[in-house]
Image (cartoon, grey):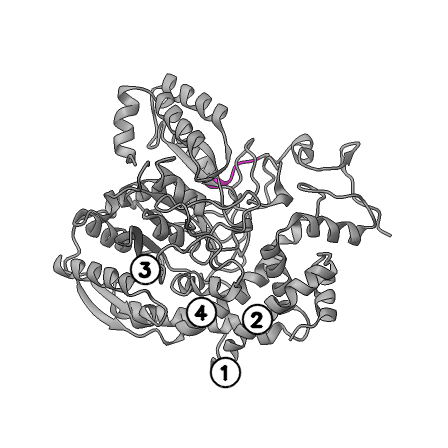
Amino acid sequence: MIGKKDLEHIGWLARIELSDEDKEKYTPKLNSVLDYFSELDKAETEGVEPTYHVLPMSNVFREDVPTASLSQEEALSNAPKNQHGFIKAPRMM
Amino acid sequence: MATINELRERIHADSSEEIVAEYLEKIEKSKLNAFITVSKESALLQAREIDSKGHEGPLAGIPIAIKDNISTKGIQTTCASKILTGYVPPYDAHVIEKLKAAGAIIIGKTNMDEFAMGSSTETSFYGPTLNPWDTKRVPGGSSGGSAAAVAGGEAPVSLGSDTGGSVRCPASFCGVVGLKPTYGVISRYGLISYANSLEQIGPFGSCVRDVATIFDVIAGHDPRDSTSVNREANYSSALKNDVKGMKIGIPQEYFGEGTDKNVERSVRDAINTLEGLGATTIDIKMPNTKYALSAYYVIAMSEASSNLARFDGMRYGLRTEDSDWHTTFSQVRAAGFGDEVKRRILLGTYALSAGYHDKYYLKALKIRTLIKQDFERAFADVDVLIAPTMPYPAFKIGEKIDDPISLFLSDVDTVPVNLAGVPSISVPCGFTNGLPIGMQIIGKHFDEASILRAAFAFEENTDFHTRQPEGS
């Protein structure tokens, strides 16, 4: 069961600010889904390998040859804040 | 609803510009809310260019609608989210490059559940899309706009994406054909990721041939997607009205409790039709199906929590008032994502967090192996599996949206396919109270040819796909 404190911590990990109203509203819904997920415990998976990807592919390599990319103007075209050809981030502290 | 072949004749006789203008007018007058953005000017411009060049390419002058999570250069792409409102991609997705090279004309971007998270198109920031068969009902989701556009005659063909049924569900609810290809057959370059190990782009059309035609154009290797496979195939050549000797498996678990009686009857009738055409049938057991929904949602939400971390208001999208680094990101995401997206990111974050990773995420991946093995065992004995696409016809708008579990349960027959990465096609196979019913034909990895052939033979011998909602 997730309590309000847990939800606050998860919200921080996920970088989603949650209002008191959000916490009130989400807690029962999240718990009902987690309750449903307890179904997983019933499956016998001793010795079963996990499947991350369905196709037997790994380490797809290519030659390290540069190709055309977005121009600086294109790359910045959607950035809400930019200055002197850079994306402007909020201050760190 | 016009087919590609019918439109080709009209384009040669008249012009692509005329056809495109007709569809644009239809969209403009429509109340379905199937589109988020209509690219009227660029579509007409493109049509005039193709008319002047003499209609070269397999889709020369054919209009197509694109789900709004597929990047289109110069055309707003929002994922039906507030956080991406106003975002104009500076590049085309691989499938869009392929469509343009084939002469197709992008007429607009279709509505969807926000970031493809849903089965009803109700979580869109732009409001729900209505089902053309009954406007009080949902069109299914998450590619609801793409399916409703084809059913409502607002586009002859369209693209969607299918993470856990998001092409097949709306195809079923709207009475059109929708294909989810084998994982890796279509490049995901330019598809805005929700759950990248599960999703594939897939085409919608009013008939199997149109779906195969689009599929032939957009499939193929792309080095920009490291999961893209390199295989040559001609899917249209698989369309033969012949299922003699085809072995059909009927997975018992897909006709379980909760399946509407009329849906079950229609699908069983459809199987009988194929038997009458020379196919043989056998009952199949897929015992791990009961774990598929939980495993699917754990994996999808976990992948989503990682994939959607990119939406931070820096490079694109909504930006709120600046504070410090972490607070700004948290506020951007609080303001930009809708409730369902937030809940899924939160649950995915929880499932991956220290202390819960093995209990949820790793366990779900092990169950994924068991489900994949169920399919491998089944396909040792049969060529295709046939089951209902959805356990019931389209439900009412608002009916399930407040109960997440009830909405999840509607995906019970579609999610196992994504966990195993196999291909599946949904085709219309009946009606109940005026609402379409879809059956899904599932194949083994890379055997789209068999499911297309079964779907085509069924279509050639029935007329469900020719029925149209009023006003389309």
- Label 4 CA crowd tier, 10 Å (few <14, some 14–19, many 20+): many
In the rendered view, would you say A38 is above or below B209? below
N-terminal-most mark, 1 or 2: 2
Give the magenta part as a residue range: B91-95
Tags 1 and 4 touching, CB below 8 Å: no
Quote the CA–CA distance across marks 1 and 2: 27 Å
Residue B412 horizontal/vertical position (percent): 41, 65
Main secondary structure type of the part rendered in magenta: loop
In the rendered view, would you say B66 is above or below B405? above
Tags 2 and 4 touching, CB below 8 Å: no
Question: Which one is closest to the eye, mark 2 or mark 4?
Answer: 2
Question: Can the viewer see residue B181 in this picture?
Answer: no
Chain ID for label 1? A
Q: Which residue is denoted by mark 1 in the rendering? A: A46
Q: Residue at x 70, y 72 (%)?
A: A3
Residue A2 horizontal/vertical position (percent): 66, 72
Chain ID for label 2? A
